[in-house]
Image: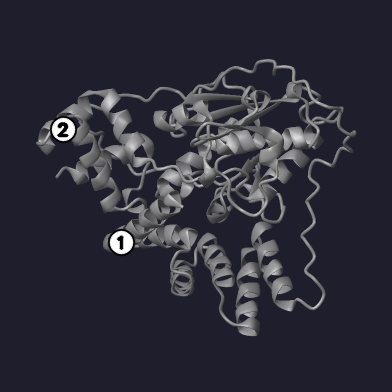
């Protein structure tokens, strides 16, 4: 097969570290596309792939498997609303103008629609904000525009928002039209250069993408995110990526379990220059700049008046939840989370070790220890912690992804691919539920 060439091509064009999706997943996507093209010769398919932009896009669509749901990590949305209110106060950073938000990648639309619902629930009017939603998969964008969602998109115990913001339709539920009007979908690639005329964003959601990149590509991606952000902007990443912005100079906003960061200071460290790679055949030449839609007035929304909202200070952190009296284990674990979220990596590592000594090993404590060690450059200890997580919780997806990336950086390609295969199988099982 042409697996190595395809891996290189996908890394070059979309930054994908193929080890994170697994050899079996990539092979399956290749077989799908060869069958769709009625091509049996791998060399003939390679020629088509490198000569036809449409086929490259179809392969990307086949490789990118969406795994998302509404209000994933709810505290991220609460933090977004709080920061948004603070930005729009008189003389605040946004100075009363509509907020600009972006979901990148937006996958099949659950995240940007959740952003719109959260802002409406927090008292924002339709004219107060606009959301851009960008993804590299045209298949995902088609699903997002269709906006009919089944049971897999509504997870967790609290789905009360569905009654307020959705209509039941054939095949599932569709967000109300006023929710859909707040979101504009477009095709784009985070790794393409950012055009100079792109207005900056106040809130940037980029969750569960960085874990699919190698370290050099993560550096490039974080540089692009920095360029998309206004000086006062908030960046939100996935729970398994919280250590990465800190290494690039971003500052934690110290909002527990929101995984939110501010832009790097002017004295941020220079990004590591990615190693030069040989362009894939038929794909040489500069990449187009990433262009976002220009700012536009948001549509009016008819809705019942809501109580006035008291503005919050721009940098005010949300206090950590208080553990019930006598719940020493939960209180200890919360201390580990607070230290990690605040960027105090050494304190987080020590607090995690103390927790494990006092209450015994648990997947939650070991995962936090692994994240802190990983972000702090202690790769050997991070690998050990992630392996212990997987011993206690074999289906811990975030630990699988992080351990795969660590092993790949250490040169253990076979081990990384094996973990990537496990992660792929786990995601497929989750989709069938």
Q: Position of residue 62 (x, y in %)?
A: 32, 38
User: Closest to the observer: 230 or 76?
Assistant: 76
Q: Residue at x 58, y 38 (%)?
A: 111
Q: Which one is earlier in the sequence, the residue at label 1 or at label 2? A: 2
Q: Which residue is mark 1?
A: 418
Residue 396's place in the image compared with 229, above or below, is below
Viewer-closest of 168 and 130: 168
Report whether 58 appears left or right of 310.
left
Q: Secondary structure at mark 1?
A: helix
Q: State the residue at coordinates (79%, 25%).
A: 303
Q: Residues within 10 Å of mark 2 (few under 14, many from 20)?
A: some
**Observer able to see residue 411:** no
Marks 1/2: CA–CA distance: 26 Å
Indicate the position of residue 151 as horizontal and vertical percent values: 53, 45
What residue lies at 66% left-to-right and 40% top-to-bottom? Answer: 162
- Residue designated by label 2: 45
Q: Which mark is residue 239?
A: none
Q: Position of residue 311 (x, y in %)?
A: 86, 37
Q: What x and y, as percent, mark residue 330? A: 71, 72
């Amino acid at each position: 097969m042409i697996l190595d060439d395809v891996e290189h091509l996908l890394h070059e064009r979309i930054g994908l570290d193929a080890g994170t999706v697994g050899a079996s997943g990539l092979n399956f996507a290749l077989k799908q596309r060869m069958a769709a093209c009625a091509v049996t010769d791998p060399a003939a398919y390679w020629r088509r792939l490198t000569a036809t932009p449409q086929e490259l896009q179809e392969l990307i669509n086949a490789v990118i498997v969406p795994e998302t749901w509404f209000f994933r990590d709810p505290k991220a949305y609460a933090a977004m609303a709080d920061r948004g209110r603070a930005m729009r106060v008189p003389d605040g950073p946004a100075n009363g103008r509509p907020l600009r938000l972006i979901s990148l990648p937006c996958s099949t639309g659950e995240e940007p629609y959740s952003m719109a619902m959260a802002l409406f629930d927090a008292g924002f009017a339709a004219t107060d904000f606009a959301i851009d939603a960008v993804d590299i998969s045209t298949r995902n964008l088609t699903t997002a525009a269709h906006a009919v969602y089944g049971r897999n998109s509504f997870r967790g115990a609290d789905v009360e928002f569905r009654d307020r913001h959705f209509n039941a339709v054939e095949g599932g539920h569709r967000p109300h039209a006023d929710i859909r009007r707040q979101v504009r979908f477009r095709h784009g690639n985070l790794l393409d250069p950012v055009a100079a005329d792109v207005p900056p964003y106040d809130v940037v959601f980029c969750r569960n993408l960085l874990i699919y990149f190698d370290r050099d590509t993560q550096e490039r991606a974080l540089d692009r995110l920095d360029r998309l952000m206004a000086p006062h902007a908030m960046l939100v990443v996935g729970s398994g990526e919280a250590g990465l912005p800190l290494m690039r100079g971003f500052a934690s906003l110290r909002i527990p379990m929101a995984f939110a960061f501010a832009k790097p200071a002017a004295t941020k460290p220079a990004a590591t220059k990615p190693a030069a790679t040989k362009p894939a055949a038929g794909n040489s030449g500069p990449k187009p700049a990433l262009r976002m839609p220009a700012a536009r007035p948001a549509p009016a929304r008819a809705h019942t008046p809501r109580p006035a909202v008291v503005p919050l200070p721009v940098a005010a952190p949300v206090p950590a939840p208080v553990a019930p009296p006598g719940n020493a284990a939960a209180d200890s674990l919360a201390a580990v989370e607070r230290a990690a979220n605040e960027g105090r990596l050494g304190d987080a590592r020590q607090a995690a070790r103390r927790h494990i000594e006092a209450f015994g090993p648990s997947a939650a404590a070991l995962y936090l220890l692994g994240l802190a060690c990983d972000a702090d450059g202690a790769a050997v200890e991070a690998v050990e912690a992630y392996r212990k997580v997987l011993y206690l919780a074999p289906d811990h997806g975030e630990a699988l992804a992080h351990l795969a990336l660590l092993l790949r950086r250490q040169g253990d390609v076979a081990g990384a691919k094996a973990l990537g295969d496990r992660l792929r199988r786990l995601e497929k099982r989750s989709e069938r539920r």
